[in-house]
Amino acid sequence: MNPFSLAGRTALVTGANTGIGQAIAVAMDRAGAKVICAGRRSCVETVSQLSEGREIILDLADPMAARDVFSEEPIDILVNNAGIIRRSDAVDFSEADWDEVMDVNLKAVFFTSQAFGRALLKREAGGCIVNIASLLSFQGGIRVASYTAAKHGVAGVTRILANEWAAKGINVNAIAPGYIATNNTEALRDDPDRNSAILERIPAGRWGEANDIGETAVFLASPAAKYIHGAILNVDGGWLGR
């Protein structure tokens, strides 16, 4: 048996239409999983890259949007990747921007995981949750107050669900991506001063690629990680160790 295989398992990946979510969906497909790509916009581009997969529209601006998804068919792996970001100085940060980010990046993560956990417990089946945290689960950042607060929260939610569900055969872990070249980091890469400062601190000497996160998600969802619970795994080119 290949301990890194996902053959025979079904995974749902949120925010799978682009970037990290797309890379995770493709990596899990290569590992043998049937992949359901969820997004607020069409994931047809991602699905076209899969050997077996389909898309569903799931707008997690409503944190309860996934409450009925897991009753429709057995799902073994949940990847909570969907997220948004708003940038503003703390003194100017609006309540609307705070609430929008917290709803998608934290509240939806918890309630989507809750719905998934309920379905697994009802089936008396094991399963796996991979949350997408951030370096800002550990650091403060600049001009991203709600994003930082939400990603700190994702780390906490990961740990509490692991505490409650590990003995029931449900693995709950998170990946904390470093600086990955995606739409969310385009503003940083377009700023010559910030881009240079970031690259100077990364021991690996480059921005990460979405597939760096995709392969890590496969590992955390695989039998190889069966005794890993409540971990926040940094995939950051060495950033936090600097």
Image (cartoon, rainbow, N blue to C red):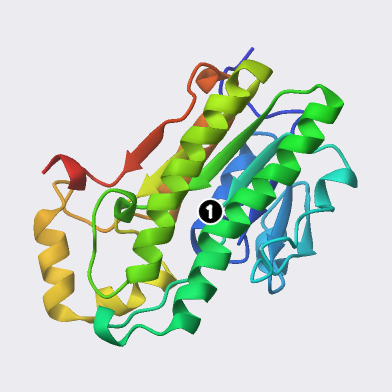
| Residue 38 image offset from top left, x and y in percent | 70, 60
| Residue 198 image offset from top left, x and y in percent | 16, 63
| Residue at (24, 60) in percent of width and height | 140
| Residue 87 image offset from top left, x and y in percent | 34, 79
- Image height of 111 relative to 191, above or below: above
Q: Nearer the viewer, residue 19 or 123?
A: 123
Q: Quadrant of the C terminus?
A: top left
- Image height of 238 relative to 13, above or below: above
Residue 157 horizontal side relative to residue 185, left or right: right
10 Å neighbourhood of mark 1: few (<14), some, or many (≥20)?
Answer: many
Outermost right residue: 72
Number of numbered tags placed on the structure image? 1
Element carrying mark 1: helix
Q: Amino acid at mark 1?
A: Ala
Residue 161 horizontal side relative to residue 12, left or right: left
- Image height of 75 relative to 201, above or below: above
Residue 153 horizontal side relative to residue 29, left or right: left
| Residue 172 image offset from top left, x and y in percent | 55, 33
Which quarter of the picture shows residue 191?
Answer: bottom left
- Does residue 181 appear in this view? no
| Residue at (81, 36) in percent of width and height | 119
| Residue at (62, 41) in percent of width and height | 28
Which quarter of the picture shows residue 94?
Answer: bottom left
Q: Quadrant of the N terminus?
A: top right
- Does residue 27 appear in this view? yes
Q: Which residue is mark 1?
A: 23
| Residue at (57, 34) in percent of width and height | 161
- Image height of 90 relative to 123, above or below: below
Q: Nearer the viewer, residue 161 or 212?
A: 161
